[in-house]
Image (cartoon, rainbow, N blue to C red):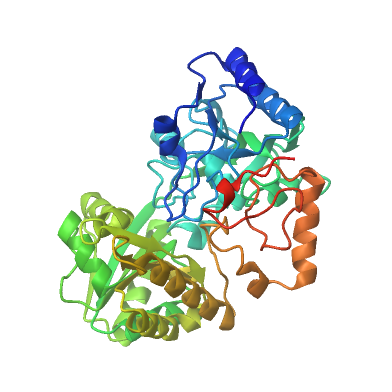
């Protein structure tokens, strides 16, 4: 239990509306977008970096775990308070502190919603490139922690490619800054180290990001297939011809029918798969690439090739893609979203394997993913009200990820490891590499109280706090 004295100190620091401690309120913070749950004992709402530093010092004095939380849209349990303790919710640190268009930079508090960055600068011809499907809700602090991606990262890269500087609070309350407004600063790349560290080494309190100019021309293409194999082969062929769209998204027949019924975006209900392809750049170059892409798609047996004629048609196609997870909810009461990566040349056989897993476990699996970089998102439909359905869904997801590793891929492309994929880290990395990762964790968080029970597999986590399986002993393990 959190000591009463600590609660009193938090109340004095943040005021009566600066924290939650009632069970009915804490329930809202026991889950994220995944399937795991664990309830914090206290949720606090800092408004400044000084608040965060004071909270860290108080937690350190009482030896209580801390877990940072953005919008709770993560899909691997990264924001779940697995060991109880305090959840630091950044929803009130949501200001855009500075926009510097002359140098194409913006300075943000961690609670700024991803899409709001682009909305703040688009009238001036700029945008922020990383665009997760949850960009209307997810926040920049969570994006940094998970190194979030999105459909357009094929050409633009993921979050780490657009973060220039970070202000962070360490577990002892020390405030540090790394990086800055300029690129290629001297010293170690600490911005790169902390981006994607899943909140296990520091709490991010300020982010400096790169802004980009809007392209002159944009074309969005829908290629329609009667074969998922042909659809997958197209992706490899586009790459082989040295064409780099800004986005190549693939939806299989199961998924596109769910999406079309929900959004009426114009996807064909009878197709086996579609590719949603976007090109950006100088108008002349974009038009030339459209014809190159047309040739590739038709040579790979696309039955139809459509180019959006208006911005409204383009927006509707992307609305279908980005609302896909919500569309699944109309069909299945529960679903489990996975996140793995395979080489582009392995997309077709991976889809075949996912079909085998679906048959083995008796669960429907739909597929939607960033085909351009091989980042798959199989969505496993299940019903938690049925005995063993959740277990089967998790085992099916693990089998898919193990296959991704076996063909030279990865267990995550953008959702992170969190508590969902910890044990698979031992399949992905050697013991020596895991020890190196653990060394960084302990360097910045020697008592292992910052987001404990995440990323590292059991046995290679911090020994100071037991990484007990969810649901056993309540997870509390204070020293």
- Residue in front for this viewpoint, 133 or 3: 3
Quarter of the picture containing the C terminus is: top right
Horizontal and vertical percent for residue 315? 27, 51
Rendered residue at 62%/54% (across/down): 454
Give x and y (percent) for residue 145: 59, 47
Please tell me whether residue 62 is drawn above or below residue 356 in the rendered image: above
Q: Is residue 283 left or right of residue 66?
A: left
Q: Nearer the viewer, residue 233 or 137?
A: 137
Q: Is residue 369 visible?
A: yes
Residue 89 in view (yes/no): no
Q: How far across and down, in percent of the image, does residue 77 sit?
A: 51, 52
Work out whether 165 lies above or below 313. above
Q: Is residue 473 left or right of residue 323?
A: right
Q: Is residue 135 left or right of residue 93?
A: left
Quadrant for residue 107, please give it: top right
> In the image, is 28 to the left or to the right of 437?
left
* Quarter location, residue 116: top left
Depth check: give the residue in front, 244 or 456. Answer: 456
- Looking at the rendered structure, the number of numbered marks drawn on it comes to 0
Q: Quadrant of the N terminus?
A: top right
Question: In the image, what residue occupies the spot 15% across and 60% down?
Answer: 261
């Amino acid at each position: 239990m959190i000591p009463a004295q600590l609660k009193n100190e938090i109340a004095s620091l943040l005021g009566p509306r600066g924290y939650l401690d009632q069970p009915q309120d804490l329930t809202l913070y026991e889950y994220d977008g995944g399937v795991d749950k664990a309830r914090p004992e206290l949720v606090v709402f800092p408004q400044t970096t000084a608040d965060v530093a004071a909270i860290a010092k108080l937690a350190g004095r009482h030896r209580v775990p801390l877990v940072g939380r953005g919008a709770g849209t993560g899909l691997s349990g990264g924001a779940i308070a697995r060991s109880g303790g305090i959840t630091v919710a950044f929803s009130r640190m949501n200001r855009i502190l500075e926009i510097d268009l002359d140098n194409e930079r913006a300075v943000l508090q961690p609670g700024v919603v991803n899409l709001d960055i682009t909305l703040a600068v688009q009238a001036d011809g700029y945008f922020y490139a990383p665009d997760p499907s949850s960009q209307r809700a997810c926040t920049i602090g969570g994006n940094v922690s998970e190194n979030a991606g999105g459909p357009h990262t094929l050409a633009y890269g993921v979050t780490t490619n657009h973060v220039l500087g970070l202000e962070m609070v360490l577990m002892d309350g020390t405030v540090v800054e790394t990086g800055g407004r300029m690129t290629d600063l001297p010293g170690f790349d600490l911005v790169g180290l902390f981006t994607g560290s899943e909140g296990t080494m520091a709490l991010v309190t300020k982010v400096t990001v790169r802004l980009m100019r809007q392209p002159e021309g944009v074309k969005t293409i829908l290629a329609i297939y009667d074969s998922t194999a042909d659809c997958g082969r197209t992706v490899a062929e586009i790459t082989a011809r040295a064409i780099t769209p800004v986005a190549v998204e693939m939806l299989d027949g199961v998924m596109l029918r769910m999406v079309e019924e929900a959004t009426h975006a114009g996807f064909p209900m009878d197709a086996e798969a579609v590719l949603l392809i976007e090109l950006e750049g100088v108008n002349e170059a974009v038009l030339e690439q459209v014809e190159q892409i047309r040739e590739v798609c038709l040579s790979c047996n696309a039955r139809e090739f459509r180019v959006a004629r208006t911005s409204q048609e383009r927006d509707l196609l992307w609305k279908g893609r980005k609302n896909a997870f919500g569309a699944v909810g109309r069909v299945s009461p529960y679903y489990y979203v996975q996140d793995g990566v395979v080489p582009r040349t392995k997309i077709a056989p991976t889809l075949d394997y996912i079909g085998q897993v679906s048959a083995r476990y008796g669960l429907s699996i739909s597929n939607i993913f960033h085909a351009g970089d091989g980042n798959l998102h199989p969505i496993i439909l299940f019903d938690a009200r049925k005995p063993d359905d959740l277990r089967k869904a998790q085992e099916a997801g693990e089998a898919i990820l193990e296959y991704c590793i076996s063909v030279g891929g990865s267990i995550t492309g953008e959702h992170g490891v969190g508590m969902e994929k910890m044990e698979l880290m031992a399949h992905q990395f050697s013991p020596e590499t895991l020890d190196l990762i653990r060394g960084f964790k302990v360097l910045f968080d020697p008592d292992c109280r910052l987001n404990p029970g995440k990323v590292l597999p059991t046995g290679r986590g911090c020994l100071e706090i037991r990484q007990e399986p969810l649901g056993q002993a309540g997870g509390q393990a204070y020293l």
